[in-house]
Amino acid sequence: MSSSKQLIINCGASRVTAAVVSSSGGALQVEKLVTESLQYDYSNDDAWLDAVGLALRDLHGQHKFSGKASFIIPGNQVLTKTIRIPHVEASKRAQIIAFEAQQNIPYPLHEVVWDSQVVGDDGVETEVLFIACKSNTIDEFCSEVAQAGFTVDTINAATVLDYNALQFAYPEMDEDVLLINIGARSTNLLFKSPEGFFVRNIQLGGNSLTQNIADSLGKPFAQAEEVKHKFFSGDVDYSDDDSGAKLLSSCSDSFMRRMSQEITRSIVNYRRQKGGAAPKRILLNGRGALLEGLTEQLASTQKVTVEFFDPLQNVTLDGDVGAGSNSLRLEISEIIGAAAQGMVPDGAGVNLLPEEVQRAMEFSSKKPYLMLAAICLALAPWPAYVGYKQLSAGYEKAAIATQAEVAPLQSRQAAIRQNAERAVEVSESISRVEGLVNSKSNWIQFFAELQDSLTTAQDVWLDTLKVNRGQSGKSGASYEVVVEGQMLVRETANGSSDIDQEVLSRRIKSLQDSFESSQFIVSSKPPKINWSSIHSGLNVLPFTINLVVDTAKPL
C-alpha cells in the first residue's frame, strides 16, 4: 500500500508546531511533533515574524527538521471575505473574483497575495471565500523560512483548515455544527452544514483576556500573561475573598460575555447570509477554550450542546507524540486539516505562495547540487591522469615534468569553460524569473486600466482577453492583446430602425482610444463590430479590438 509523508509547520500567533505526518490507505499517522513557544511581546504585531524565524531556526538546529514544508499562517495575519459572484466557468472565475475583491478589501489588489475557496454554488451564484495576505508579509515570511533552512512548498491559511479536520474526524456528521477555535490573537468560527461551510474570523482571543488583566492590574502585557497562566492553571491558590482573585475572575467573566456576544452576532450573520439553520451543536477547539466556565456560558446562552473537538479521531500518534494527547487535541486541528485536505470530500485550502517566488526558491535550493556536480565533472579526468602517470614511468624526466605541469592546467581550463557555460545558463534562468515578476506587476496594472476604461464607458463588458504573440524579427518580438466584448444598446427598445450606427461606432472608437492610452499599449487596429446582433433584434453589440503591446513594458 502506497504512503506519503509531509512536513507541516503551523506558525500560530503564540507558538510554532512542526509535525511529520504520513498518510496511507485513508489513514493519518503523526510520526514526529515538536512545539516551540514564540518569545515576543504578544501585543506587538510587528514582532511576530522575527519570533517565528527564531522558532524555525530552533526546529531546524535542535530538532533536525529541514527540507520542503507546508506552512500555515494564523487567521489574524490574513484578510477573509465572503464574496458572491455570478456562476461562470472556473477559467473565468479568477478575473471576476479579483474585480469583486477590489471593491471589498481595504488594500489595492497588487499589494496582496490572494487565493480563493469555493464554499457554495447553486448554479446561479457562486459563493467564494476570498483570502489574502499582504505581499510584504509573505515576502518576509519566505525570507525567514529560507534563513532557517526550510523550503516553502505551500502557505495555507488556518482559517479554512478546521473544515477538513472536522470532516476527517467526524465523517458521519451531517447536522449543522459550529466549530470555535480560540487562539491567542483571534478566534475562528467555522459553520458546517450539509450544503457547505461558512467562515468568520473575529479579533478576540486569549491575548484579549491578557490585555484586560493588564489594564485592570496596571501591569505590562508580559507580566499580565504570566499572572493569567498561573491563576487559570491553578498553580497559585487564592482565597475566595482575595481581591486579586476577584479581579481576575471579573476579567474572565467579561471575556466570556464578549465571546458569547460575538458568537451570537456571527450566528445571526451566518443565518442572514446563508439562509441556513442555527447550529445544533458547538465544538470548542484551541487553548483558549480551556478557560474555566466558557463551556457552561456558551451552553447557557446558545441553548445547544457544547463539547470539545477531538481532531485526533482516526489519527494514529507514533511513540512519544501521544504523551500529551489531551492538550495536543486543542492545538493540532489545523495540521490535521492540512494533511487531510486531499482525503476528504471537497477539501478546503488555499496557497498564498506566489508562483514566481516558489520557482525562485526551488532553483535556489538546487544551486549547491549544481555547483557540486560542476566540481565533480571538473575532477573527473584525474583518475585517468594518475593511471597514465604510472604507465609513463619510463619516460624521460623532462617529458614527465612537462606533463605534470600541462595536465592540471588543461583540467582546470575545461572546468572553467564548463562553469562559465553553466553561469550563463544560471543568469538566463534568473532573468526569466525576474521577467515573470515584472510581468505579473504589469498585468495587474493593465487590468486596473482596463477596468477604469470600462467603468468610464458604461454599458460595456469584456467576454474574453487573449494574447497573440508574434515571431521575433529584426525589430524584435511583437504581440497583441485581443479583447472581445459587448456593448449594451439601450436604443433597440424602440426597434432596430432607430439605431444610429455612426453613434455606436464612435462609442466603441472612444473605448478603443481609452484602451490605447494605457502605458502598455502603443497602438491598436480598427475595431471589428458585429452588427448582425442588432439586426437580429438583440440589444447588445459585439466588438473585437486588437491592442499592440509595448515590448518595452511586456505583459
Image (cartoon, helix red, strand yellow):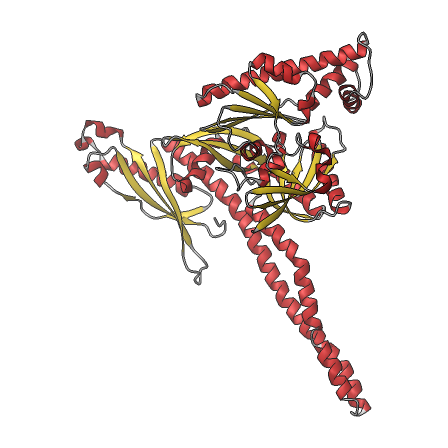
Q: Quadrant of residue 299?
A: top right
Q: Position of residue 479 (x, y in %)?
A: 41, 53
The answer to which of 345 and 96 lies nearer the viewer is: 345
Is residue 64 among the parts visible in the rendering? yes
Please give left or right for residue 351 compared with residue 183 in the image. Answer: left
Q: Position of residue 411 (x, y in %)?
A: 71, 76
Is residue 136 among the parts visible in the rendering? no
The answer to which of 306 and 71 lies nearer the viewer is: 306
Q: Position of residue 195 (x, y in %)?
A: 44, 28
Q: Quadrant of residue 474?
A: bottom left
Q: Quadrant of residue 69?
A: top right
Please give left or right for residue 465 compared with residue 161 in the image. Answer: left
Please give left or right for residue 78 compared with residue 553 in the image. Answer: right
Q: How many marks?
A: 0
Please give left or right for residue 488 compared with residue 187 in the image. Answer: left
Q: Position of residue 294 (x, y in %)?
A: 66, 17
Asked if 315 appears above or below 229 in the picture, the reply is below
